[in-house]
Image: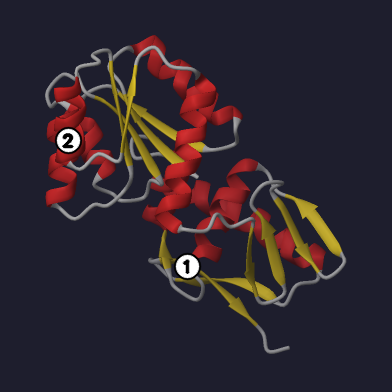
Amino acid sequence: MRILIVEDEIRLAEALGQIIQEQKYAVDVVHDGEAGLDYAMSAMYDVIVLDVMLPKKSGFEVVRELRENRITTPVILLTARDEITDKVTGLDCGADDYMTKPFSPEELLARLRALSRRRGEVVLEELAFADLTLNLSTYSLSCGTKSVHLGFKEYEVLNILISNPKMVVPKEDIIVKVWGAESDAEDNNVEAYISFLRKKFFFLGSRVSIGTVRKVGYRLEADEA
C-alpha cells in the first residue's frame, strides 16, 4: 500500500510517516495543498491523508479538485476542528473519511486498511505471474519449492511490474513510485534493481524474465512452460 500524507505540521507529518513506514507501507509526505494536489494527481496512491488547514490550498479545495479531475483515490481528512459543518463540507467535497486531532495511530492505521479494502474490495496477499508468486506481506518471492526474500526497493519494483503483467512500465513511472517525484534517482538506479531481480529469478530457476524495451522501460515476460 502506498500512502500520501499532506500535513503542514512538520513534526506530526514526520511522525505519521514513520508510523506508516513501520507497517511496511510506502509513504510520501508533503506540507502544503498545492504540492499535495500535484502528488495526488498522479493517482498512484492507495489512500491520501489530507489536513484541512493547509497553506496555498485547503484540504477542502484539494479533494474537490481531485474529484473534479476524476481522481478517485480514497481521502481521509484531518482537522483540529470538530464542528459538524466542517465534517459535512469535507464529505460533500468528496472525502471518504474524517478524523479529528488528536487521534491514536492505531485508529488511523485501521482506517487506512479499511479504505484500501473498500477501494479494491479485496486486499490481496499475493501476486503471481507465470511460475512466480510475490507475497505482499513477507516480501518473499517464490517459484515452486524455492523462495527468496526481497529487499524493500526490489519488492517495490517487482510489485509494479507484476501488477501490470506484460505491459511496458516506463522507467520514469518506476522512479516516481519507488523513489518519489522529488528524488534524485535516475535511470541507473532502476537498472541496478532490475539487475538484482534478474539474478533472483535465475536463482529461483524461474521461466520469467524482465524484458527491456529500449529507451522506454521494462515488462515481465515468460517462456512457454
Label 2 close to label 1 by CB (< 8 Å): no
Mark 1: few/some/many CA within 10 Å (<14, 14-19, 20+): some
Q: Which residue is mark 2?
A: 62
**For the point 60% across and 36% down, which residue is it?**
24
Mark 2: few/some/many CA within 10 Å (<14, 14-19, 20+): many
**For the point 63% across and 57% down, which residue is it?**
195
**For the point 51% across and 33% down, which residue is it?**
110
Q: Which residue is mark 1?
A: 164
Question: Which percent across, then down, holds residue 180?
Answer: 40, 39
Answer with left or right where residue 202 lies relative to residue 164.
right
Name which residue type carries label 2: Val
Up-down relation of residue 28 to residue 55 (above or below) = below
Spot the residue most to the front.
84
Question: Which percent across, then down, holds residue 196?
Answer: 67, 54
Name which residue type carries label 1: Asn
Up-down relation of residue 222 to residue 100 (above or below) = below
Q: Is residue 184 visible?
A: no
Depth order, front residue of 164/200: 164
Answer with left or right where residue 1 lies relative to residue 34.
right
Up-down relation of residue 147 to residue 74 (above or below) = below
The quadrant of the rendering that contains the C terminus is bottom right
Depth order, front residue of 190/34: 34
Mark 2 vs 1, N-terminal side: 2
